[in-house]
Amino acid sequence: MAILTLTDICKDYQQGKEAVRVLKNINLTVEKGEYIAIMGPSGSGKTTLMNIIGCLDVPTSGTYVLDGKDLKDLSDDALADIRNTHLGFVFQSFHLLPKMNALDNVALPLLYAGVPQKERRERAAEALKSVGLEDRMTHLPNQMSGGQCQRVAIARAMVGKPDLLLADEPTGALDSKSGSQIMEIFRRLNDEGMTILMITHDAGIAECADKVYKILDGELHTGDGKGGSTDEEA
Amino acid sequence: MRENIALAFQGIWSHKMRSVLTMLGIIIGIAAIITIVSTIQGTNEQIKENLIGAGNNVVTVQLNQNGYTYDMSWNSIPDGVRVVTDQTRQELESIDHVEKVSLYTSRNYAQQVFYKNTSFNGEMYGVDENYLSVYGYQVKSGRGFTKADYEGCRKVVLVDTNAVTSLFGGEDPVDKTVEIQGDVYTVVGVVALSEEFAPTITSMRDYQLYADTSSGAIYMPDTTWPTGYRFDEPQNVAIKVDSTDAMTTAGKAAADLLTENQIVDPDNSEFDYRSQDMLEQAQQLQKMSESTNTQLIWIASISLLVGGIGVMNIMLVSVTERTAEIGLKKAIGAKKKRILLQFLTESAVLTSLGGIIGVVSGIILAQLISSMMQIPVSISPPAIVIAVVFSTLIGVIFGMLPAIQAANLNPIEALRRD
């Protein structure tokens, strides 16, 4: 079953008087349970693609079907709802709210979903436990290491039980040890059935995924048959 | 909403210095307004008390000729004016808020009144049984009028304390005799306004009014009046009402009723009855003090406006600073309304806090002014409520633009910038 299908997605940006085409006829299908990496150098359009898949941006043309639903012409608030219930985000720089402790950061998406407070706390605590941070719940982001912050961010992405986990350079700000820890978590999540789409410019990180696409100058290419196990990571 | 308010306090607390400076405009504006309003209220209440006398809600309704009070010292009995009958008196008593009615005849300048060789030029009254209680007079020594005095048309008089001084040179007048219009009258008692009803003098005009009556007054039973003066004099009326605020309406109603009943052909007569309402005079004075203070309130409002703009400025800075936070919140599913509410709440909490601090400092300032400059103040609860609500409103109004800006932030832009 396809979680998402992109058909002929194009994205233009206005640069001065002329339009620059950043994405050119992207076609991509992600099946449930897949673990995909999209690789590309900076300026290749990978972040733009990520934004479109993440419903943060809308394509200039083409259709995007997420969970069987065409996302064309949805309002900002409707897109916010979709981000809240269907998608989980992990960013390069974590984007944790600095004045909230780990538990409150993780519980935030549930607040927007209208979950009552008691249940929010329980589910957030559970999510933190699953990334091994049960003893850091009341810590503020600046009291934690980068790796711990990214694990909090993963817990926040997972707490709403999304259909798709989107990760934008999840290890970009981390040392290699923390980075491989994050990759282990991703692997475990995927083994538990989570669909993951990761964007990176790092081939070593992309290798952790089951399937690698390459994006160059706004065009998406199938990777050179990379796949198989990532057991070497462990 | 509770979370928003908690969040707002957190934000304000984490920028203490900035928040206090931002609130300062609101604090000053609200404090100034509360101080001004308190002094207006205090002054007004003082004016009211001074002129009317606290608790003595008496309206005098007098016969007027061409708009001037008709004084029978020099004039004959007016044509076309009837004597007030018992029936009219009952009608007066049944007017709303009227507690008691008194009828009396009077001379502003008593003539041919002597005690030994001293002549008296104060006022002379012929009064009914209600008169003393309506105006709040108390018998200080001797006795008041009895039923027998009225029924027997006895030649007895009461004098007030001013008359004791001017006519009797301070001697105890009780049981002394005075000559009025050639007849001998016995003084049976001394009356004085009871303390609580005595008006205070605060202006030149009050002083003149007071000076006019400083020769004092002599009272005799109205049944005795015709012996010394004339039969069938149309009376004036004093009505006591149950509340100060009802004075004007009850006075007007009584005047209308009297004009209707007592004046023959009221439409063409040069005579009518008019109420002489101290409340009305008090209100005129109050209006004067209010109009000057309204201007002060306008000036204070400018401070509020400036304060509001300051709040808007800081909120705009705050939105820019928290772009990443807003972007993240939107990315994980916060809707526009939620972001809008968060920032509106923050600016409203900020200005409400400023308003509350302003109210408190305003009250302190008013008390300070009151004790230093002898100006009375009266803190009015509605003014406090309005001030706080108004300051909240300022927060909502001036927070609107920054909040809308935050709500419309593009999450991509917001996330990219950090």
Image (cartoon, coloured by chain):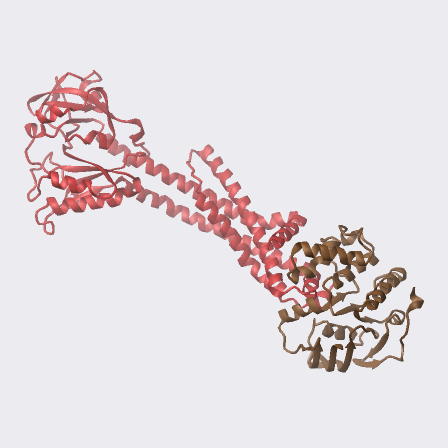
Chain colours: A brown, B red
- Which quadrant: the N terminus of chain B? bottom right
Quarter of the image where one finds residue B99: top left
Visible residue check, residue B416: no
Q: In this view, does B92 lie above or below A123?
A: above
Residue at horizontal 28%, vertical 34%? B56
Residue at horizontal 65%, vertical 66%? B409
Q: Position of residue B55 (x, y in %)?
A: 31, 34
Q: Where is residue B228 in the image (x, y as percent from the top left)?
A: 7, 27
Q: In this view, does B354 lie to the left or right of B191?
A: right
Q: Is residue B82 above or below residue B410?
A: above
Q: Position of residue B332 (x, y in %)?
A: 70, 64
Residue B230 vs residue B329, the one in the foreground: B329
Q: Position of residue B306 (x, y in %)?
A: 54, 54
Q: In this view, does B51 lie to the left or right of B272?
A: right
Q: In this view, does A190 lie to the left or right of B115?
A: right
- Which quadrant: the C terminus of chain B? bottom right
Visible residue check, residue A131: yes
Residue A108 vs residue A91, the one in the foreground: A108
How many numbered marks appear?
A: 0
